[in-house]
Amino acid sequence: MEVQSVQLFFFIAFILVQSYCIALDTISANHEIRDGNSLVSEGGMFELGFFSPGKSKNRYVGIWFKKISYGTVVWVANRNTPIADKSGMLKLNRLGNLVIVSGGNPMVWSSNSTVFVHGNNSVVVAQLLSNGNLVVWHTNKIIWQSFDYPGDTYIAGMKFGKDLVTGLLRFMSSWKSPDDPSVGEYSDKLDATGFPQTYGRKGDVITRRLGPWNGLGFSGFPDEKGNPIYSTDFSLNEKEIYYKFELQSSVVQRIVLTWDGKTQILQWIERIKDWIVYAETFVDTCDRFSLCGPNGICSINKHPPCTCMKGFEPKNLEEWQASDWVSGCTRKTPLNCGNGDGFWKVAGVKVPDTGRSWYNVSMTLDECEMACKKNCSCTGYASVDIRNGGSGCLLWFHDLLDTREYDSDQDIYIRIDATELEGLMDSQYNFNIRKSIIIALLLTSTALSLIFVVAYACRKINQWRHKGRGNRYLLDKKNRRVEIDHLDDLQFFSLFEVARATDNFSVSNKIGEGGFGPVYKGVLDDRREIAVKRLSESSQQGLDEFKNEVICIAKLQHRNLVKLLGYCIYKKELILIYEYMPNKSLDFFLFDETRSLMLDWSQRFNIIHGMARGILYLHQDSRLQIIHRDLKAGNILLDYDMNPKISDFGLARNFVGHDTTAKTKKVVGTYGYISPEYAVHGRFSIKSDVFSFGVLVLEIISGKKNREFTHGDHNDNLLGHAWRLFKEGRSTELMSGSLQASCVVSEVLRSIHVALLCVQHHAEDRPTMLSVVLMLVSEGVLPQPKQPAFFTGEIQIEVKSVSSADDYMITQPYAR
């Protein structure tokens, strides 16, 4: 009898456990989830329960990842009504309404989802699905779902858009801060007043725009041709308009609108157990909404970036010349609809704002042109879908806003006056026609002997103008060929073009000089400003640098890397052409007593972030994984908006896979930025760049050079001084006095802490750049740094230069 009782007890326990497991992802009517309990989706990917975000002690009901990245929240119910203690409960009533109650408050939050219940057989259940969607079922029909009410996060399967039947708008809204999930000031919403597109707003002000769907992707965003990670679905019908993405593989991605207004696609990397930024919707100056005003067009490859469209001129020339483009452009000649206005094609664009546009998805491009011609108010037209030669019709009837040049197959046809159109066409063709006639007359009227002389002279001139065209080699000091790869990825510039752009390498255009040669500012025929680096013929190292520059960055594209536009080769003449950086380099501002006042804390913090993202791209995300080896303030260039761009890849090395460490007998770099293992043993790795980054961060915060730093109380360099202050809890004393008014103390302290982790003596103790990027933006607890390299309080390592004239060639290191 006793044995049977024990068996019965275990059988009942087994049934109860089984029932609990089966119901793990659901709650039925009149049941609740108390603070401390949770639902877990089938497969264990998502969990629902109570949580406290960041440093906050408030309690919220939310859904978060459980199987990976535990605690990463994707949805919050009571965003604006937190609970102050742990008395909260989530209930499902018999009418199908989810409610949150707490203590004496009977209604903290409600789903407002009720149904009319017929009899006792009606079943209402709430379930956390495997895709992270919390749904309420009533007799096998969904009456409410969390996917209809997103917060700051979109995950696979969620719709972004508008239900035209119910009026429900599904959009993203940021948290107020990492500790407060209540609705912040940033939002991303679909606008369907014209052809659907997405606006990013700060409050009621539009800050950016994601162009409309063009069949392959969003206009002004990289096309998703053959994307193996996710697919994007766009639906436009009489019932709803929405975008939705579905994952194509086991990769996990989410889209987040951060509390400070960035819309990012984040991807989970299982190998490092962390999220990385896969893409951002706002990447450069031209992504600012309507930066160039009405009828202006923005190009990131031009400086200034704004120009007027063909047939237009600045509305306020004085403002335009002062780089204030908000008033935009006006027509040179008013339209005369009955006099045969024409259309000028602008290829490769992000189409203008479609907020007040008209569209028809079934028309052809020719029919679209006819429709625009018939309407005197039509200002331009384009295809709705750019696939297979284009289809559909998109018409504009107002000023064209927020247009930018973009590397895509999207074109737009702008309406301009017939006389203006004729003038534009004449300017393209007439010059060549007149030139051909003159040459023909001269040749036919010249004696045979003169023809030979002219032909010979012309051949010589042509050779000079096109020196080295298409060459993939150059000559070294002994006139031996040296092959150069990757030139197919770069534009060739003739020596004639470069000389003309720089006024024949005029001293007045010289903007700098390094160990490899002078750098000149130039202006091309299309008015693009460029920086021309003319490598010294006498420098054998110049050849090495040239090869490195071409090999390392010809195929790299990142907002925080300087862009190599092209090259020029002729025998021993080596020239590289870059985008021009109007604000020179970081050291130009940082170490000058007056100019440093122009760099407030937000700008310095932005520079730190930009450098980190650029180095992370080199180490991990680029097609060629790169170790830079010469990161210093002089090699961080600043663009028009003071955004940092890493330059000078002459000493860089690429590595493959896990082969991230190498050794050399010839140590190169710059005093103050070289890691100890590299200086002493010639070993370099990605951690060498991490060390240099740490030094740069301390220099940016203090405004002092590591190499030249002195202090009256000790002989430490800047790293040692920062270490002493950190150990004594006085890190804010490291900060430059000019930052007192603008600094955010928590950001300064975190940046110093991260920098000290980067400059630790042993390479294996230093974090990777991915960890650095995440530590800079997170609020989590950081590990304690160990003693920095070259700390003179206990050990001093000195590095002697082989040549006092050469600041960056370093050999013969020794310890003392």
Image: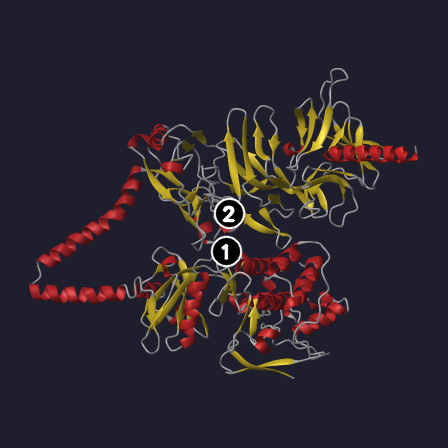
Instruction: Left or right? Give the position of 419 relative to 535.
Output: left
Q: Quadrant of the N terminus?
A: top right
Q: Quadrant of the C terminus?
A: bottom right
Q: Secondary structure at mark 1?
A: loop
Against 151, residue 606 (above or below) is below
Q: Given the image, on which type of amino acid does mark 2 rest?
A: Asp
> In this orientation, which residue lies closer to the viewer: 656 or 642?
656
Badge 1 crowding class, 10 Å Cα cut-off, few under 14, some 14 to 19, many 20 or more, is: some
Q: Given the image, on which type of amino acid does mark 1 rest?
A: His
Number of disc labels: 2
> In this orientation, which residue lies closer to the viewer: 313 or 387?
387
Extreme residue toward the right, this view? 2
Extreme residue toward the top, this view? 119
Instruction: Check disc 2 and report the residue beneath it.
Output: 287
Question: What residue is shown at x 60% (from left), y 39% (from top)?
Answer: 204
Instruction: Left or right? Give the position of 278 relative to 429.
Output: right
Residue 558, numbered label: 1
Q: Is residue 200 visible?
A: yes
Dividing the picture into quarters, in which one does residue 746 lie?
bottom right
The image position of residue 565, as x and y in percent, is: 40, 59
The image position of residue 387, as x and y in percent, is: 40, 37
Badge 2 crowding class, 10 Å Cα cut-off, few under 14, some 14 to 19, many 20 or more, is: many
Instruction: Left or right? Give the position of 81 relative to 484.
Output: right
The image position of residue 639, as x and y in percent, is: 50, 59
The image position of residue 557, as x and y in percent, is: 47, 56
Colour treatment of the image: secondary structure
Query: Real-space Cα distance between discs 1 and 2?
Result: 15 Å
Against 84, residue 111 (above or below) is above
Question: What residue is shown at x 46% (from left), y 75% (from top)?
Answer: 515
